Image (cartoon, rainbow, N blue to C red):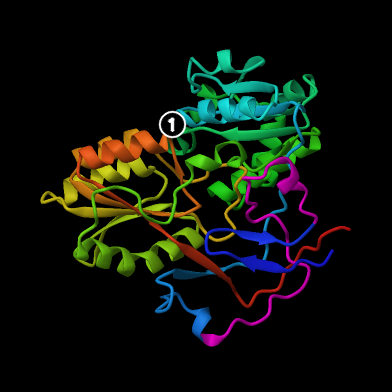
Amino acid sequence: MDARWVWDGQHQAAAHSGRLSDSYPNYRPAHRIILTRPVQKAPSEHRDLHLSQNTGRIQTPMAGVLSILPDPPPAPAPIGLIAGGGRLPILVAKGLRDMGHPVHGIGIHRRYDSTLPALCDTFKEVGLFRLGSWGRKLRSRGVKHAIMVGHVDKAEIMHTRWRLLKNIPDLTTIKVVLTQLRHDRRSHAVLRAVAEELDRKGVSLIDSTIPIQSQLAQPGVMTLTQPTAAQQADIDFVWPMLTELLRLDIGQSLCVRDLDVISVEAVEGTDRMIKRTGELCKKGGWTLAKGARAQHDRRSDVPTVGLKTIENLAKNGCSCLAIAAGDVIMLDRIEMIERADELKIAIVGVPVSHRPLTTTSTTEIQQ
């Protein structure tokens, strides 16, 4: 299969059969095809991170190997929903139902929202470290495709005492940890291991943003509240640093004020970083920048902000939120923007263009 790359400023899509557009006219695929040949060298002016003088678009390099995401099945095929905490699984369940799909949910024990089971045709609770049961429960309902979304506190489950006694793993999970996660337990490695195990059970994870395209950040200033000249300068200054942070899969956010980085997100998550930034920058007026790395795997862990984020930002002195357009989910987007205006917080969608690096693919598409 010969893949030709089309760069549209928000998403990267391969030119192929176009089957998705028939079933989902509003869906724009991202990061779907693995390169079949070495990436051509980009011109030297494109190999470094910089802000384009012509478009105002922040240009960032894209790695050569991308994840292949299966096409979502046409309605009324059933779709599974693997749910962590927060409101995102609820919006995904509603979106799938609106698209005509029966939803068969499995919720992580003590983490999913209590209102979620009522939105699913069937629902089962599963243990966080009982990975072997996830695929079996979904396949028993005739599910071949699933979406995995929702918050799971990685700091809590990975870096607390007695974590294995509190979350007794099954043999499948133990095998995955000892083999696939032995040398790397960053988020993308964990996701890949989970996806491969589910695939062995006959369940393929699909792009988690398919049912919630209207909730993705848009380019430009989304609030009536405008960023100041100093805040815009902070965004231009810090975005290349954020891109490198994302490339290394350390975190998804950092905070800046007066052309100086105040804090960087790691395993603690955005909410704890916001609180820490408020303690470090008592005078307020700082900016939070959040995005997704190039070729981010949309099967899970898509960067997300919401009403809770806005409330936390206001409480801790932030006055501007800069997020990657097309790459960050805005939960209850309209309500979030309205609340940001009430709290005098500007929300800016940064249009990001991911340009190819001089990298050779190690994986080929099987025709």
The location of residue 219, given as percent across then percent down, is: 42, 56
Of the 4 image quadrants, the one containing the N terminus is bottom right
* Residue situated furthest right in the rendering: 367
Camera sees residue 306 = no
Q: Out of 29 and 283, give the one closest to the viewer.
A: 29
The location of residue 358, given as percent across then percent down, is: 63, 78
Q: Is residue 83 above or below residue 251?
A: above
Principal SS element in the magenta part? loop
Of the 4 image quadrants, the one containing the C terminus is bottom right
Left or right, 111 with respect to 96, comes to left
Q: Out of 96 and 282, give the one closest to the viewer.
A: 96
* Residue situated furthest left in the rendering: 283
Left or right, 47 with respect to 66, comes to left
Left or right, 322 with respect to 213, comes to left
**Residue occupying the point 72% across, 53% down:** 68
Q: Is residue 291 above or below residue 59?
A: above
Q: Is residue 250 above or below residue 36?
A: above
Q: Residue type at mark 1?
A: Arg
**Residue occupying the point 68% across, 80% down:** 40
Camera sees residue 204 = yes
Residue 267 magenta: no
Residue 30 position by quadrant: bottom right
Q: Which residue is mark 1?
A: 161
Left or right, 85 with respect to 145, comes to left
SS assignment at label 1: loop
**Residue occupying the point 51% across, 41% down:** 214
Q: Out of 230 and 362, give the one closest to the viewer.
A: 230
Q: Out of 206 and 160, give the one closest to the viewer.
A: 206
The location of residue 122, given as percent across then percent down, is: 67, 14
Q: Which residues are magenta?
A: 17-44
The location of residue 182, given as percent across then percent down, is: 63, 48
Q: Residues within 10 Å of mark 1 (few under 14, many from 20)?
A: few
